[in-house]
Amino acid sequence: MNHLIDPNLHIWHWQIPLYLFAGGLAAGILFFAALNTILGRKEKYPVSVKLSPFIAPVLLIIGLSALFIDLNHKLYFWRLYTTIRLQSPMSWGAWTLMIITPLSFIWCGLNIKEILPKWDWKYKVLIDLEAFLRKYELVIAWLILIYALILGVYTGILFSAFNARPLWNTSILGPLFLTSGLSTAAAVIVLMSKSQLERHYFARIDLMLIGIEIFLIIHMFMGFLASTQVHIDAANLFLGGPYTTPFWLFVVSLGLVIPAILEILELLHYKMPAWIAPVLVLFGGLMFRFIIANAGQASRWLY
Amino acid sequence: MRYAMAVDTKKCVGCSDCVVACQTENKVPIGFCRDWVVEVTDGTYPQLEIEIRSERCNHCDNSPCVRCCPTGASHYADGGVVLVTHDMCIGCGACIASCPYDARYPHPDGYVDKCTFCLENRVQKGLNPACVSVCPTKCMYFGDLDDPNSSVSVILKKRKFKTLIPEAGTMPQLYFLI
Ligand code: SF4
Ligand code: SF4
């Protein structure tokens, strides 16, 4: 409507989808690490507990940097942390990251000797701190589990809180992005693990998550198509509109259906390069966030 | 106190004087605007009807932009006017995405900007907003809805009006006389 403002309306570019992808993936990785610790499966699935979490802080820092680059008024970044605004998903996200990022560093600190056996903390304070934190490992695992879930859901809620963009305005995006984040995390663990037991376990989890994702996507469209004209228009962006090909090709086919078939074949002991399915899942997860971010900004109320 | 504005779509000729007055009064950077004029044509030839509207932020009673702001920069000021505190705004863009009327824009200085109803620079000094004062057809009415004698209350009692996308639930306070 407003032609002078419209070109600037596409306010979120690559930074926000990248931030959400990195956040969702980190949340998934930390979730599995905490879960397998709590369930006492540390030795059974060592990569998920001890090795993959080392990627989480890196991802969280990439995500936070992307968010920072997205801000137009960077010098005032700290304003996020002078207030808590319960109704603002951005505020939730900023605070959740503020808590889960240090937790992820602590987790890595507790596990660093697993990957660098010669690691030495050198200073007495650090040695004492490690011993102290190790006593509370289970408590930390629980905290990580809870905050990872909040982070994973938040990556979807950030979008769904915007009633002004009908495509985003569905609460299914919360569980959908959480599931997608967990699925990309399972894919990373499959990529990193050398033990067949662990790989097959996470391939099965991934398969289940892909199933849930497809189910949620179908429900998302059913919800839109049963709603108002603007919601039907939003769904039509993917059902014949400009986002049809990228969505059904990259997200659904390459990112969900094909990896699911490959994983089934692998579980049935067909020989194939094990990296293809997880890489496709990661690619699909990234595309999914980009497509939803862009398409959402193209969907609007009519007046 | 509840500030509101009424725009007479039957009187507006779409001259855009309000846009220029606002840009001048509020030093809006080149290429941006806080208010704009929309022309909507309905019907099929030869039965056509044109509606011309001068639009801006609706200073909604239930503003998604205030709700989603992570810092509290977007807030309700006197009379329900929605304002952005520049040095609290981090420029995250959440409010721009949240406004169904696309009333906000990212100011080149970093913060997000939009119509202020000229609250601090004119209204609190007893003047009308710049757009209202300058309109050559006098098609805009501004004032306090809680005061039954304000020009906006008086005209809304007399005329039929509508708001834009009331179904979005934002409770807009910009009334269009039809
Ligand atoms: S019109 Fe947009 S910017 Fe103005 S108060 Fe309503 S939602 Fe906020
Ligand atoms: S851009 Fe500024 S005013 Fe808008 S939501 Fe972010 S901090 Fe608030």
Image (cartoon, coloured by chain):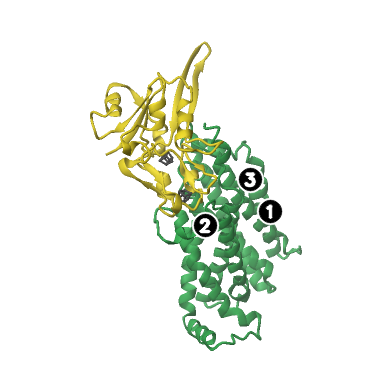
Chain colours: A green, B yellow
| Badges 3 and 1, same chain | yes
Q: Quadrant of residue B55?
A: top left
- The residue carrying pointer 2 sits among few (fewer than 14), some (14 to 19) or many (20 or more) residues within 10 Å by Cα, namely some
Dot 2 or dot 3: first in sequence order is 2
Residue at (52, 10) in percent of width and height: B46
Alpha-carbon span between mark 3 and mark 1: 14 Å
- How far apart are labels 1 and 2 at the CA level? 45 Å
Q: Is residue A108 above or below residue A301?
A: below
Q: Is residue A178 left or right of residue B145?
A: right
Counting from the top left corner in percent of width and height, residue A253 is at: 67, 49
Q: Is residue A149 above or below residue A102?
A: above
Q: In the image, which disc is placed on residue A67?
A: none
Q: Which residue is mark 3?
A: A247
Q: Give the residue drawn at x 49%, y 65%.
A: A98
Residue B118 versus residue A160: which sits nearer the camera? B118
Residue drawn at (49%, 29%) of the image: B20
First of labels 1, 2 by sequence position:
2
**Badge 3: chain ID:** A
Q: Are marks 2 and 3 on the same chain?
A: yes
Three-letter amino acid code of the residue under disc 2: Leu
Q: Is residue B121 left or right of residue B2?
A: right
Please give left or right for residue B73 compared with residue A200 in the image.
left
Picture layout, residue A272 above or below residue A142: above
Across and down, in percent, residue A182 comes to 57, 61
Instruction: Please name the amino acid that badge 1 sits on.
Output: Ile
Residue A180, given in percent of the width and then of the height, sits at: 57, 57
Instruction: Look at discs 3 and 1 and give the one toward the viewer.
Output: 3
Q: Secondary structure at mark 2?
A: helix
Kind of residue sitting beneath label 3: Phe
Mark 1 highlights which residue? A258
Mark linked to residue A75: 2
